[in-house]
């Protein structure tokens, strides 16, 4: 593990990583509420839109697999900033894309660099933060999801509605420049993981990770929880507009309400996971998430306020599972192989996202009236994957668990 930082430097580190993650999450999330606009702009089907979402994920899966061959050979800060810079350029290319095909390629490039970047962020948390506080640290970085839904997505949709769909991508590229300047000043160098002995070949670390049965269990668990969420998430906006009867101009409220709620609940869940046990809290939140998975995919025309209750509960519980889950997954890695493992985890998660959104895109369709058909079937698939993950989680062993000191219940930091 990296030598301990002062509390102030640790806080700055987590805030900076949260800012980097915010850019990454916003770039991925903005495609989903832009769905109705892009379908109308390019004249594409729900299947083609699903491929547009999946291209990001499949590219992230491929890059994560490649990164597993070299990520533990380089100093963390320099590698993260290099990937972040390339990610910003690819996102700018999305905003400049002249048509569907070029946007598809640009999304793939953004996913390729974003996948490595996301893995590095989680790796640095595992390197620096002790096990006993790791879930709360993960919740702080996971707040990037909440902030992106509260501020980023509504602002991006406002830009898209008042200018055009390209504006959000230019906005994200500008954010990347800002956070690069902050990261250059705040992030410490991390070289402790680099072994003096040279690996026999570039795949040696990857094979070492994959020979560990506990690593494989953690990767399967990771795939299940991502699959259970991303069968449903990419199509919520389409279902809201075409089936629930929500105006496109009210869609920012869905993300604002959900993000505002998770901004509070994410830290609560992280605190409870460190205090009462990561596996136990994960199971409670994941089982509770079954209800919004069912309701959101089956409900018909309802008032805006009721739909906001449903979607906010969905965001709180479905995203809330990821806080104890990521602490479990990160802690399953052998410390000396954490970078390689987290790159493979990023590959696993990205592949699960791509598979989920592609599968759901082929299950659902639009009828002549424009309604989304068979979204309920997608909900059942998501619930089955979620239940499998709940059953499987206890099979994962966590490094550092026995040495963990329970945090004192003095309030949420």
Image: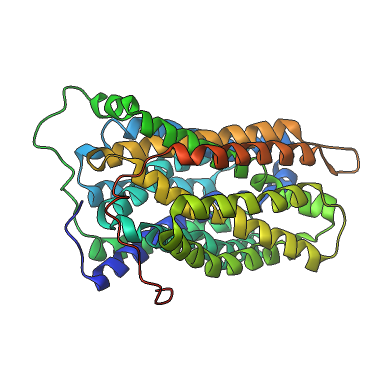
| Rendering coords of residue 270 (x, y %) | 46, 61
| Rendering coords of residue 94 (x, y %) | 52, 46
Foreground of the two, 102 or 380: 380
| Rendering coords of residue 322 (x, y %) | 51, 51
Query: Which quadrant of the figure contains the C terminus?
Result: bottom left
Decide if residue 63 is in sight here.
yes
Q: In the rendered view, would you say 347 is above or below 243?
A: above
Decide if residue 105 is in sight here.
no
**Residue 261 is drawn in which quadrant?**
bottom right
Q: How is the image coloured?
A: rainbow
Q: Is residue 134 left or right of residue 389?
A: left
Q: Is residue 387 left or right of residue 95?
A: right
Q: In the rendered view, would you say 174 is above or below 394?
A: below
| Rendering coords of residue 143 (x, y %) | 48, 63
Q: In the rendered view, would you say 69 is above or below 291?
A: above
Foreground of the two, 15 or 329: 329
- How many dots with numbers? 0
Foreground of the two, 23 or 288: 288
Foreground of the two, 371 or 338: 338
Q: Residue furthest left?
A: 196
Q: In the rendered view, would you say 107 is above or below 270?
A: above
Q: Residue at x 39, y 77 (%)?
A: 410
Q: Residue at x 85, y 65 (%)?
A: 303
Q: Is residue 147 left or right of residue 116?
A: right
């Amino acid at each position: 593990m990296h030598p301990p930082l002062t509390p102030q430097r640790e806080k700055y580190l987590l805030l900076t990583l949260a800012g980097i993650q915010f850019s990454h999450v916003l770039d991925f999330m903005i495609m989903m509420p832009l769905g109705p606009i892009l379908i109308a702009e390019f004249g594409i089907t729900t299947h083609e839109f699903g491929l547009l979402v999946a291209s990001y994920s499949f590219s992230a899966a491929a890059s994560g697999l490649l990164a597993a061959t070299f990520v533990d050979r380089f100093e963390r800060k320099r590698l993260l900033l290099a990937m972040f810079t390339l990610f910003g350029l690819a996102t700018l290319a999305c905003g400049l894309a002249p048509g569907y095909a070029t946007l598809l390629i640009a999304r793939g490039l953004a996913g390729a660099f974003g996948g490595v970047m996301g893995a590095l962020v989680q790796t640095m948390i595992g390197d620096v933060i002790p096990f006993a506080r790791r879930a709360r640290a993960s919740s702080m970085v996971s707040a990037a999801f909440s902030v992106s839904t509260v501020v980023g997505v509504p602002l991006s949709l406002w830009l898209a509605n008042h200018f055009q769909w390209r504006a959000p991508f230019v906005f994200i590229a500008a954010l990347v420049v800002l956070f690069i300047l902050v990261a250059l000043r705040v992030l410490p160098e991390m070289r402790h993981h680099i072994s003096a002995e040279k690996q026999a070949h570039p795949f040696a670390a990857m094979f070492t990770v994959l020979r560990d049965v506990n690593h494989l269990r953690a990767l399967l668990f990771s795939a299940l929880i991502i699959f259970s969420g991303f069968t449903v998430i990419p199509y919520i906006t389409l279902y809201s507009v075409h089936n629930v009867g929500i105006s496109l101009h009210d869609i920012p409220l869905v993300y604002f309400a959900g993000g505002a709620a998770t901004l509070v609940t994410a830290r609560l869940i992280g605190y409870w996971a460190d205090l009462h046990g990561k596996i136990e809290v994960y199971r409670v939140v994941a089982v509770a998430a079954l209800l919004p998975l069912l309701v959101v995919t089956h409900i018909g025309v309802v008032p805006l306020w009721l739909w906001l209750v449903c979607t906010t509960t969905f965001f709180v519980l479905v995203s809330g599972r990821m806080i104890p889950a990521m602490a479990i997954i990160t802690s399953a890695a052998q410390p000396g192989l954490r970078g390689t493992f987290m790159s493979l985890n990023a590959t696993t998660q990205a592949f699960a996202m791509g598979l989920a959104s592609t599968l759901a895109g082929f299950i659902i369709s639009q009828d002549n009236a424009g309604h989304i058909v068979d979204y309920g079937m997608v909900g059942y698939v998501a619930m089955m994957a979620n239940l499998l993950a709940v059953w499987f989680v206890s099979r994962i062993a966590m490094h550092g668990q026995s040495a963990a000191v329970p945090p004192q219940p003095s309030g949420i930091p």
